[in-house]
Image (cartoon, rainbow, N blue to C red):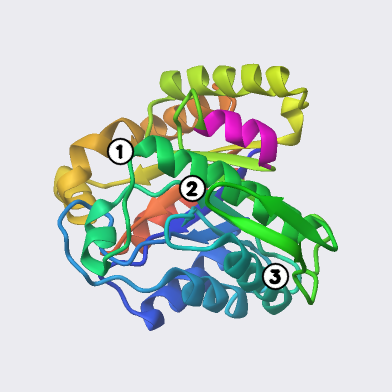
């Protein structure tokens, strides 16, 4: 059965608005809520108004009672995996065992540049992702972890108190076929990619499964998810996504209720086991409620 969730962006909004939105999402019957990890708006505008991710992940845990609480995804470029693993273990306690962690290689250079954080070439960032994912998995799953990498080193490291969940789910975000999907095959319990069309999604699922075969992993162990936008009009699309509106358009739900449901069905046929509605302020709660009424939310 497909899980339906909502991915809530943290730009151009307030804590009060988000808390009210999360509670409404949970009341509507969605099974997942996530936040992103950015310091600047993730819309190509360079605007700096954006709430911080770990703090809001904790707030999400404290202001819901049933949904899974995730982040898609934390950047290993400015989140050391040991610090991050400890934060998520604590968030798992705050949520009563409902936390998920996602990690990715990072992409929004404007925020790195603004804060003087190195933004290396993509090949380096993906090697950092692979090492970071290995460290996070070791810290959250094992009593002690030693790791000697090029970018991260752990020496008999512990993450205490342990998470509530013995196997807190680890997600890898991104669609790079040569490296990112191979990292997912090795380390992920879930894989997420945003804003691609159903046919492109189907192709990437096939690539991920091939990587699983190559590393000796059962692909059924990895939950497959997609983030899709939702917009009532072109103006709404641009209000939410700014300068990246055209980039995300292939993965946005628009049109009549039936057109939206047909596209949701196409993602399910392409392999998606979880579909997250990626919302950004200005929040279209009425549209989300209409969608919820049409979806099999259980």
Instruction: Quote the CA–CA distance across marks 2 and 3.
Output: 18 Å
Q: Do we see residue 30 in this rendering? A: no
Q: Quick one: label 1, few (<14), some, or many (20+) residues within 10 Å?
A: some
Residue found at x 15% / y 56%: 45
Is 177 one of the magenta-colored residues?
no
Q: Which residue is mark 1?
A: 254
- Taking the image as shown, residue 89 lies to the left or right of residue 292, namely right
Instruction: Identify the residue position indicated by label 3 in the image.
Output: 89
Q: Nearer the viewer, residue 50 or 253?
A: 50
Kindly report which numbered mark, 3 or 1, lies closer to the viewer in this rendering: 3
The label nearer to you, 2 versus 1, is: 2
- Distance Cα–Cα, label 2 vs label 1: 28 Å
**Between 118 and 202, the one nearer to me in the picture:** 118
In primary-sequence order, the first of circles 3 and 1 is 3
Quick one: 298 or 132, which is closer to the camera? 132
Quarter residue 247 falls in: top left
Structural crowding at the residue carrying mark 3, measured as other residues with C-alpha within 10 Å and reported as few (<14), some (14–19) or many (≥20): many
Is residue 181 shown in magenta? yes
Q: Position of residue 197 (x, y in %)?
A: 38, 26
Q: Which residues are magenta?
A: 180-188
Task: Name the residue tied to disc 2.
Answer: 104
Q: How many marks?
A: 3
Indicate the quadrant where residue 48 lies.
Answer: bottom left
**Does 61 appear above or below 272?**
below
Q: Is residue 172 left or right of residue 186?
A: left
Q: Label 2's element? A: strand
Disc 2 vs disc 1: Cβ atoms closer than 8 Å?
no
């Amino acid at each position: 059965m497909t899980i339906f969730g909502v991915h809530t962006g943290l730009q151009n909004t307030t804590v009060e608005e988000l808390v009210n939105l999360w509670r409404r999402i949970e009341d509507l019957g969605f099974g997942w809520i996530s936040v992103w990890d950015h310091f600047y708006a993730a819309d190509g505008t360079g605007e700096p108004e954006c709430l911080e991710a770990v703090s809001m992940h904790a707030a999400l845990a404290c202001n819901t009672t049933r949904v899974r609480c995730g982040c898609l995804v934390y950047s290993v470029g400015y989140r050391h995996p040991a610090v991050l693993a400890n934060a998520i273990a604590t968030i798992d306690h705050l949520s009563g065992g409902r936390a998920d962690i996602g990690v990715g290689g990072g992409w929004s250079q404007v925020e790195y540049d603004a804060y003087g954080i190195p933004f290396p070439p993509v090949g380096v960032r993906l090697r950092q992702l692979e090492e970071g994912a290995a460290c996070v998995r070791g810290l959250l799953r094992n009593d002690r972890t030693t790791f000697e990498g090029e970018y991260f080193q752990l020496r008999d490291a512990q993450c205490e108190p342990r998470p509530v969940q013995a196997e807190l789910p680890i997600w890898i975000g991104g669609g790079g076929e040569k490296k990112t999907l191979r990292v997912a095959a090795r380390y992920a319990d879930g894989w997420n990619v945003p804003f691609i069309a159903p046919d492109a999604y189907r192709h990437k699922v096939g690539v991920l499964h091939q990587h699983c075969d190559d590393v000796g992993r059962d692909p059924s162990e990895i939950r497959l998810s997609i983030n899709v936008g939702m917009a009532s009009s072109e103006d709404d699309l641009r209000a939410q996504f700014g300068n990246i509106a055209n980039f995300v358009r292939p993965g946005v739900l628009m049109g009549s209720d039936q057109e939206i449901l047909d596209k949701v069905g196409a993602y399910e046929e392409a392999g998606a086991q979880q579909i997250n509605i990626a919302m950004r302020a200005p929040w279209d709660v009425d549209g989300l409620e209409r969608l919820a009424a049409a979806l099999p939310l259980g």
